[in-house]
Image (cartoon, rainbow, N blue to C red):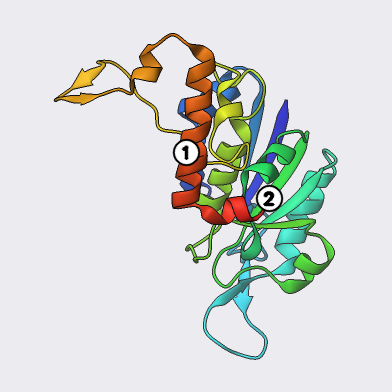
Amino acid sequence: MLHIDIITVVPELLDSPLSHSILGRAKDRGLLEVNIVDLRKYGIGKHYQVDDYAFGGGAGMVMMPQPLMDCIEDLQSQRTYDEIIYMAPDGEQLNQPMANKLSLQKNLMLICGHYKGIDERIREHVITREISIGDYVLSGGELAAAVVVDTVGRLLPGVLNDETSALFDSFQDNLVAPPVYTRPAEFRGWKVPDVLLSGNFEAIEAWRYDQAVQRTKTRRPEMLEDE
């Protein structure tokens, strides 16, 4: 089972995305455990403060080191983490090979930034990995954390009804997925390629591979350049 703790100041943002569909089934089957931790419980003073002004001035608030460190150490007293991950716009970009590796771990901690982010000292001394889901900025790291959990969780053995399906997802073999079709074989005069109706599985696999290569060349040529 994979256990994931997510530290956030807005836990409500994560309730729905992590409770339904494939992730819901993974949790019900005991394959994935996701614990959402409200950082404000570790806040300072009667107002449970978790952020303060940045040294040197400038707009925006910064998440304070003390509440975050108290939370991290509390969680570390309960288990050993394979990775302590900060969701950051300037982190390494999430991709399928990274998701594959994370899915093999046992315990992950995800930290959701907010405001102007977290105190740099936590990044320097505590964080083991920083992940971005794209070159843009979100209001907080919660949605990015949900993307990571979904990407990783669906790879766990037993989560998907067809356990081989994840192996043929886009990016698993450095190619995007080929086109897919379902019934009826003809819809409004638009026909399914004959090869898919032939029953010749060797020819079908060859067609799918060719389509994946062609689609990758057209839509994501940089993936082939990286090989």
Q: Is residue 19 visible?
A: yes
Extreme left residue here?
Answer: 188
CA distance separating discs 1 and 2: 34 Å
Q: Which residue is mark 2?
A: 227
- Residue nearest the observer in this picture, 152 or 188: 188
Q: Mark 1 Cα within 10 Å, few/some/many (few <14, many 20+)?
A: some
Q: Position of residue 101 (x, y in %)?
A: 74, 39
> Amino acid type of disc 2?
Glu
> For mark 2, does the 10 Å Cα neighbourhood hold few (<14), some (14 to 19), or many (20 or more) residues?
few
User: As shown in the figure, which amino acid type bears the numbered disc 1?
Assistant: Pro
| Tag 1 residue | 17
Classify residue 188 by image quadrant: top left
**Rendered image quadrant of residue 155:** top right
User: Looking at the picture, how far across and down is residue 121, in whole percent?
Assistant: 78, 71
Q: Residue furthest top?
A: 199
Q: Is residue 193 left or right of residue 22?
A: left
Position above or below: 225 against 29? below
Indicate the secondary structure of the residue bearing disc 1.
loop
Q: Is residue 212 above or below residue 227?
A: above
User: Which one is nearer the viewer's eye here, 49 or 212?
Assistant: 212
Give the quadrant of residue 115: bottom right
55 horizontally vs 211: left or right: right
